[in-house]
Image (cartoon, helix red, strand yellow):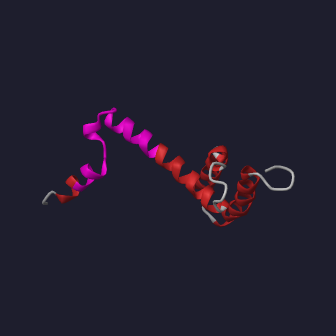
Amino acid sequence: MGRTVPTVRQLLNEEYQEWIKMKVMLPPEERKALKELLDAALTRSDAGSIVPKAIPSETLFMLMLIHLKARVDALEERLTGGDPLNSCTDERMHEIYRKPK
């Protein structure tokens, strides 16, 4: 990749430019969220280059999901104090929702 074939970063940047246009129709707080997600994906573009045959928009979305998952994990860590018994694993969530009311 280089002079004749665009790099993954260039392709993701093109996707970014297309998706950022959506912000004009969003309320201010959602504009901020959209920009944050798109920026987070671009900062991880090197990881996206590992899967060169992926469609650029799929790579962009996957990188956004990774960013969100990392943030959820960090929040969960803060809420549980790092105690795995208090974490919100799938098993723990099922246990909570199965309890009779």
Q: Could you tell me residue 84's position as x and y percent?
A: 29, 37
Q: Could you tell me residue 14's position as x and y percent?
A: 75, 58
Magenta stretch containing residue 2, yes or no?
no
Query: Please, which residue is most extreme toward the left here?
Result: 100
Closest to the observer, 56 or 88: 56
Q: Does residue 70 sit above or below 98 in this rendering?
A: above
Q: Could you tell me residue 5's position as x and y percent?
A: 81, 56
Magenta stretch containing residue 75, yes or no?
yes
At 34% from the left edge and 33% from the top edge, which residue is drawn?
82
Closest to the observer, 54 or 31: 54
Closest to the observer, 6 or 70: 6
Query: Please, which residue is most extreme toward the bottom here?
Result: 25
Location of the C terminus by quadrant is bottom left
- Write the start and end of the magenta stretch as one range: 71-94
Q: Could you tell me residue 62's position as x and y percent?
A: 56, 55
At 30% from the left edge and 52% from the top edge, which residue is drawn?
90
At 87% from the left edge and 51% from the top edge, which residue is drawn?
3
At 60% from the left edge and 52% from the top edge, which residue is drawn?
37
Q: How many marks?
A: 0
Q: Main secondary structure of the magenta part?
A: helix
Question: Is 96 on the left or on the right of 30, as rendered?
Answer: left
Q: Does residue 33 sit above or below 23 in this rendering?
A: above
Closest to the observer, 12 or 72: 12
